[in-house]
Image (cartoon, rainbow, N blue to C red):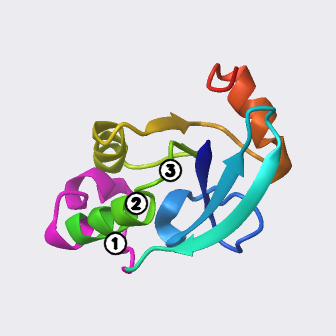
């Protein structure tokens, strides 16, 4: 199973969501063990706005649409996306492609992903 987690440093989870444009993509085997980790860069810049309060308003603009498409392309082979938070349009787009999206999860150690997936019922 491939799991994507937003990152700022290609080592740990970003608690600011996917804005940095980097994702750790972790391959978890059936036993819940980490087999491979890669850092992927989204081929677009996140369209930063001046105020986070207007995120939902600008999330449907053309710049954000390009960003969302680039994220979807970056994560096309991923099964699960785990993040602290993510905009509703991106969540819906990921889910429409059959991805499982889990929000509100803090991961302090990427090697704990197997346990987290098991606890969420995503790994038997």
Element under disc 3: loop
Element under disc 2: helix
Q: Position of residue 64 (x, y in %)?
A: 25, 66
The residue where tag 2 is placed is 52
Residues in magenta, as a range:
44-64
The residue where tag 3 is placed is 78
Distance from Cα at disc 1 to Cα at disc 2? 7 Å
Count of number-bearing discs? 3
Q: Residue at x 70, y 20 (%)?
A: 124
Distance from Cα at disc 2 to Cα at disc 3? 28 Å
Point out which mark residue 49 bears: 1
> In this rendering, is residue 34 above or below 119?
below
Locate residue 17 relative to residue 58 in the image: left or right: right
Q: Position of residue 101 (x, y in %)?
A: 48, 37
> In this rendering, is residue 117 above or below 73?
above
Q: Residue at x 59, y 36 (%)?
A: 104
Q: Is residue 108 visible?
A: no
């Amino acid at each position: 199973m491939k799991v994507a987690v937003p990152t700022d440093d290609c080592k740990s989870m970003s608690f600011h969501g996917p804005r940095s444009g980097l994702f750790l993509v972790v391959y978890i085997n059936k036993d819940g063990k980490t087999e491979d980790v890669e850092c992927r860069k989204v081929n677009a810049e996140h369209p930063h706005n001046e105020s986070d309060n207007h995120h939902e308003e600008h999330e449907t603009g053309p710049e954000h649409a390009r960003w969302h498409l680039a994220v979807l392309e970056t994560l096309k082979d991923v099964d699960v996306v785990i993040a602290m938070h993510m905009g509703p349009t991106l969540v819906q787009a990921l889910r429409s492609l059959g991805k499982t999206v889990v929000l509100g999860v803090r991961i302090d150690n990427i090697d704990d992903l197997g346990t987290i997936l098991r606890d969420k019922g995503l790994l038997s």
